[in-house]
Image (cartoon, rainbow, N blue to C red):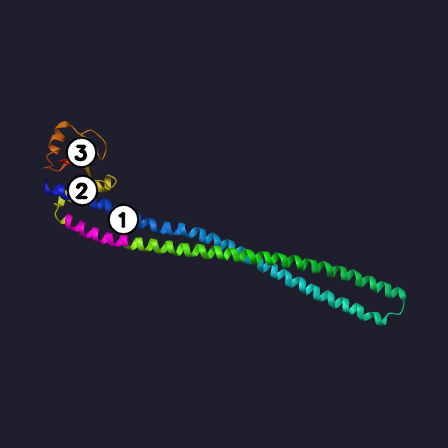
Amino acid sequence: MNENLGSLIKLQQIDSKIFNINRICNEFPLKIAEAEMPLKESLLFLNTSKQNLETFEKRKRDKERELEDINQKINKLKARTADIKTNKEYQALLKEIESIEKERSSIEDEILTIMDETETAIKKIKSEEALFKVEKEKIEALKKKLEDEKTEVEKELITVKEMRSKIVDAIERDIYDQYITLIESCNGIAISEAKDEICQGCNMNIPPQLFVELKKNEEILSCPQCRRILFYKNSS
Ligand SMILES: [Zn+2]
């Protein structure tokens, strides 16, 4: 086989490999971002629940203050009973106290409801925190796995690039330039196999006379359709 052709075939294999490695490397950030999506969602739920809890706690404090004010009011009214002279005044005062006590009872009910809601919110936070923890551990493990894979692939890339430069050294300059031009214009495939009189790069027929020449693998010959450099794989 033509030495340049032999090296070009190896170079194409290496370049396809490099292309794949680069594609894998480029996919890592996306893979990590995708893996982190459920975690971000869990955190969002958790934060919303925590905010809800804060709202309940604030409402409870407000209601407790209201209750305190009302209790003071009732105490003041009750203290006035000593100064009361007439039955009419006494009845009026009792009525007033009764009405405020009703108000107090309704505030107490509200506080109980808020306490129930708080309890539910705390339970929800606890279960969401547990879920978040599980998600986080899962994602940390996955990230570690992806990082390890990336390191491996990057190591492989260095080795492959070293191999590439050795092969390139063995190829004549103008043939290498032709190869690079084809790589750029032919979707990363510059060298293609001629099989059964068909170019495997563009699937077009190869003229019989050219195919006869190709089978010798003695020259750098191009596909008349796609211009890719052709080679023939001997089955023997
Ligand atoms: Zn072709």
**Element marked by disc 1:** helix
The N terminus lies in which quarter of the figure?
top left
Amino acid found under the numbered disc labelled 1: Ile
Q: CB atoms at circles 1 and 2 under 8 Å apart?
A: no
Seen from this angle, which residue lies furthest bottom? Answer: 82
Secondary structure under tag 3 reads strand
Quick one: label 1 or label 2, which is nearer the N terminus? 1
State how far apart marks 1 and 2 are (Cα).
20 Å
Give the tally of numbered discs.
3
Ligand 1, by image quadrant, is top left
Residue nearest the viewer, comparing 68 with 235 = 235
Q: Quadrant of residue 215?
A: top left
User: Main structural element of the magenta stretch: helix, strand or loop?
Assistant: helix
- The magenta region covers 152-167
Residue 124 is left or right of residue 184, and the answer is right
- Tag of residue 194: 3
- The amino acid type found where label 3 is placed reads Ala
93 relative to 202 in the view: left or right = right
Mark 2 near mark 3, Cβ–Cβ under 8 Å? no
